[in-house]
Amino acid sequence: MRTALFVLLACACFTVAEPARADDAKAEAAGRALFDEGVALMNANRFPEACPKLEASLDKFPGIGTRGKLAECYEKAGRLASAWVTYKDVARLAAASGDATREKVASDRATAIEPKLAYLTVVAPSVEIPGLVVKRNGRTIERLGAPAPVDAGLVVVEASAPGRKAFTTQVLAASGQTSNVDLPPLEAAQPAKAAPTTSAGTTATADYDANAVRTSESTWQKPVGFVMGGAGLVALVAGGFVGLSAKSSYDDAFDTGRCDRATLACDAEGQKTTEDARTTATTATILAGTGGALLLGGVLLYLTAPRARPPSAIRVTPSVAPGHAGIIVGGAL
């Protein structure tokens, strides 16, 4: 019985351990592939692209060799603070494992770049703020008031706290220099204003103002449409009368013999009569075109007057020129 139980437990442990070893093998293979890609990019002097590959490799399968290569990549990419911190980690891990050679190389490189580091000191607000969280380039700062090494370049500092307005600033950190950021007392956040409620307890919305706008629109749009349509109808009738008068004068010049219908030749008086008739006909055309435009505009204004929907913005512009008349309608129906 004991032998059978031992065998059963051994099989169970083997069954559990086997998938774990397979996952570790996959992670190691992925880490090595990323490491090789990062090293290849470093050899091509493409350090900004190489460092993320080595970071991903370290996440997949951490190792002191990958960490050392990442520190070298940071240094060659100009990210000296990141390189310094990573070299320090390599030296510490090498000392713990008894690798004196690797420890000395990492320590020497960290010491060499230390004078070139940029530092940033974030000073706490003058008053204590409960729940204050301060971040530097997205990472929480655990200790305020102490200079910390940062990669040279633009550094974003954010401060936030419950019930307070967030504060954000940027500072340009320079190699070999220390920059300071003094955090102001964060202002209290304004409480959200409650929407007014009606006597029935429901929240009042902007429908009241919208209805007022719609009412305002309809009070002018329909009357203006009537006026425009009436004016257009009058202009159309006037254009018709003027046009008939022009035709009558033109025909009279031929009927009285002052112009010849076959050759269209006219004497002086007939020439003047036909020219006056043509001018009058042009006026009739303009009157008729303008009247049609006004009539159409009036109809459009009347038909598009808002009823139970948001107001329409309709622009109706008559377009009149000698021998031409029309209407330009614009806006949203």
Image: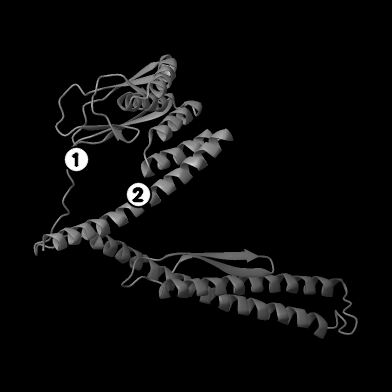
**In the rendered image, which residue does mark 1 sit on?**
190
**In the rendered image, which residue does mark 2 sit on?**
24
Q: Is residue 260 left or right of residue 177?
A: right
Q: Is residue 204 visible in the rendered structure shown here? A: no
x and y, in percent, of residue 87 in the image? 39, 25
Q: Could you tell me how far apart the alpha carbons at marks 2 and 1 are, in whole angstroms?
A: 52 Å
Q: Quick one: quadrant of the N terminus?
A: bottom left
Q: Is residue 262 left or right of residue 127?
A: right
Dividing the picture into quadrants, the one containing residue 245 is bottom right
- State the SS at label 2: helix
Note whether 93 is above or below 164 in the view shown: above
- Of 297 and 131, the residue lying toward us: 131
Q: Earlier in the sequence, mark 2 or mark 1?
A: 2
Dividing the picture into quadrants, the one containing residue 135 is top left
x and y, in percent, of residue 13 in the image? 22, 56
Kindly identify the amino acid type of the residue bearing the numbered disc 2. Asp
Q: Is residue 169 visible in the rendered structure shown here? A: yes
Query: How many C-alpha atoms fall within 10 Å of the one at disc 1: few (<14), some, or many (≥20)?
Result: few
- Of 51 and 310, the residue lying toward us: 51
Name the residue: 43% across, 48% down: 29
- State the SS at label 1: loop
Name the residue: 42% across, 35% down: 66
- Does the CB distance between marks 2 and 1 fall below 8 Å? no
Kindly identify the amino acid type of the residue bearing the numbered disc 1. Gln
Name the residue: 15% across, 60% down: 3
Q: Which mark is residue 221?
A: none
Query: How many C-alpha atoms fall within 10 Å of the one at disc 2: few (<14), some, or many (≥20)?
Result: few
Note whether 31 is above or below 117 in the view shown: below
x and y, in percent, of residue 273 in the image? 78, 73
Q: Quick one: quadrant of the C terminus?
A: bottom left
- Of 138 and 296, the residue lying toward us: 138
